[in-house]
């Protein structure tokens, strides 16, 4: 948490403008397009990364499909993971998040501004409706990311199993799946230090519908998991 405190101290003069004006302004989702709202976040995040003494190495942006309407599936290590995505993914991208985040100060405002979709994982019927809704949004050209592990691994660069249910979104939308390997992200906010640190994000080659249409969602999850894990093993220098 020391690094979060460092960032707050070093950007404190920006906060009244960022949150007091910009975020409150862009919470009006009817007046401002998602592109306008996301562009603001995309411009702010690199400043936060720099002030936090973080170096983020990004690879594979050329692998992102040219046409929007794809499903991004990253492994989950910690609080920095969404920041890594925001700072490297120029096109608007939304996400499904756990419902608890909608009550966290500041975070809830950003979630509303970016139209993230809260999910109560204990509500099975509600979760099914959300998956159907998000699948429809993806089919209509929205990009979404969801962490298929369901929670952060807490094991450094070791990843947990990917949940098959996550990929129902892609199968219903018949959308490309972009596996994403995040490496050393856990070191950023989950270690109590402000030493300069480096994290990596790798956008891997997409898996198109024709490649996975005959697979069960659990098999799709295993396919994506193994590609992410292979990349992590190749680039993990620890």
Image (cartoon, rainbow, N blue to C red):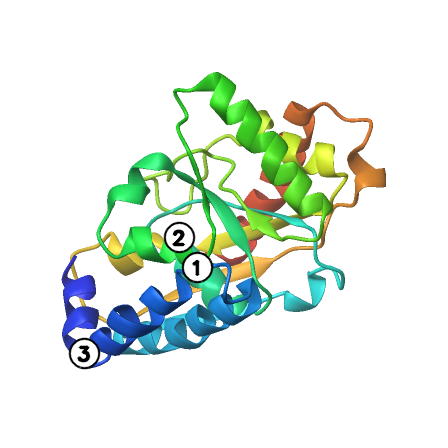
141 left or right, relative to 75 = right
Disc 3: CA contacts within 10 A as few (<14), some (14-19) or many (>=20): some
Q: How far apart are marks 2 and 1 (CA)?
A: 37 Å
Q: Residue 79 placed where, x, y %? A: 32, 52
137 left or right, relative to 10 = right
| Secondary-structure class at tag 2 | helix
Quarter of the image holding residue 62? Answer: bottom right
| Secondary-structure class at tag 3 | helix
Name the foreground residue: 146 vs 75: 146
Q: Which label lies toward us, 1 or 3?
A: 3
Residue 237's disc is: 1
Q: In this view, does 83 lie above or below 219?
A: below
Q: Residue at x 68, y 50 (%)?
A: 70
| Secondary-structure class at tag 1 | loop
Asked if disc 2 and disc 1 are in contact, CB closer than 8 Å, the reply is no
Residue 27 can be seen in this image: yes
To which residue does mark 2 refer?
A: 112
Q: Which residue is drawn at 24% across and 70% down?
A: 20
């Amino acid at each position: 948490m020391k690094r979060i405190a460092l960032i707050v101290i070093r950007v404190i003069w920006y906060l009244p403008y960022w949150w007091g004006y910009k975020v409150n302004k862009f919470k009006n989702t009817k007046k401002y397009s998602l592109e306008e709202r996301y562009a603001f976040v995309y411009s702010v995040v690199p400043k936060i990364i720099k002030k936090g003494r973080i170096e983020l190495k990004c690879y594979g942006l050329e692998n992102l499909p040219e046409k929007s309407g794809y499903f991004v599936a990253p492994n989950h290590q910690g609080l920095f993971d969404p920041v890594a995505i925001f700072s490297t993914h120029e096109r608007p991208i939304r996400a499904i998040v756990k419902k608890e985040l909608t009550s966290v100060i500041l975070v809830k405002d950003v979630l509303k501004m970016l139209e993230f979709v809260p999910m109560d994982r204990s509500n099975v019927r509600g979760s099914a409706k959300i998956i159907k809704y998000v699948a429809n949004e993806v089919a209509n050209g929205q990009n979404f990311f969801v962490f298929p592990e369901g929670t952060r691994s807490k094991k450094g660069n070791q990843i947990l199993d990917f949940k098959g249910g996550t990929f129902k979104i892609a199968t219903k939308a018949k959308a490309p799946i972009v596996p994403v390997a995040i490496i050393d992200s856990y070191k950023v906010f989950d270690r109590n230090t402000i030493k300069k640190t480096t994290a990596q994000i790798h956008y891997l080659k997409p898996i198109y519908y024709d490649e996975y249409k005959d697979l069960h969602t659990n098999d799709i999850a295993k396919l994506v998991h193994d590609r992410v894990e292979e990349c992590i093993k190749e680039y993990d220098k620890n």
